[in-house]
Image (cartoon, rainbow, N blue to C red):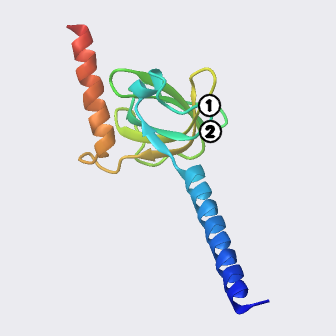
Amino acid sequence: MKARNKRLLLVGGGVALLVAAVALVLTAFQQNLVFFHTPSEVYEGKAPTGRAFRIGGMVEEGSIRREADGLTVSFAITDTAKVIPVTYRGTLPDLFQEGKGAVVQGMLDAGGHFRATEVLAKHDENYMPVEAQYAIDQAHKAAQTVQQ
């Protein structure tokens, strides 16, 4: 085999390995990508079906219910316009409370109930993720427009 053919074979093999590596990285990235949505967006059908995503908002007052097993908790997340019921099995963060901000990650079931796999509570009174604050403000404006 000529030297030129060997070089072409090596370059072609290197390019093939590079393409395979990039494809694997992009596939892994796509599988781990989690989008943020508000309860209003979920009601509008903008949330993905069959994929994990996050919902952010406030824990609705009076909505926290603990099951007898001590691990299963039901509550509702609201953006002041719409409410999404959530069920979570596990230990909640210490700062998780009614009337406080939270972000939950999981999937929406066929009945419109959110099955959370992770619950994040805001860490102090002054912090709210920019996306969550914007979404709450927009939902509040929309609710005021409808009431007028």
* Whether residue 70 is situated above or below residue 31 in the rendered picture: above
The three-letter code of the residue at mark 1 reads: Glu
Callouts 1 and 2 close, C-beta under 8 Å: yes
| Residue occupying image coordinates x 35% and y 28% | 79
Pinpoint residue 12: horizontal percent, then vertical percent.
67, 75
Q: Secondary structure at mark 1?
A: loop
Q: Nearer the viewer, residue 7 or 2?
A: 2
Question: Residue 77 at what x, y percent from top left?
Answer: 43, 30
Viewed as shown, does residue 32 lie left or right of 57? right
Mark 2 crowd level (few <14, some 14–19, many ≥20, 10 Å Cα): few
Q: Which residue is most to the right?
A: 1
The residue lying furthest to the left in this view is: 148
Task: Out of 7 and 72, give the one closest to the viewer.
Answer: 7
Disc 2 marks a residue whose amino acid type is Gly
Q: Is residue 96 left or right of residue 4?
A: left
Q: Which residue is mark 2?
A: 70
Q: Is residue 63 above or below residue 148?
A: below
Kindly indicate the quadrant of the structure image that contains residue 135. Answer: top left
Describe residue 27's horizontal placement relative to residue 125 as left or right: right
In the orientation shown, which residue stands out farthest toward the top? 148
According to the picture, the residue beneath numbered tag 1 turns out to be 67
Work out whether 140 lies above or below 118: above
Q: Is residue 5 left or right of residue 78?
A: right
> Split into 4 quadrants, where in the image is the N terminus?
bottom right
Outermost residue on the bottom side: it is 3
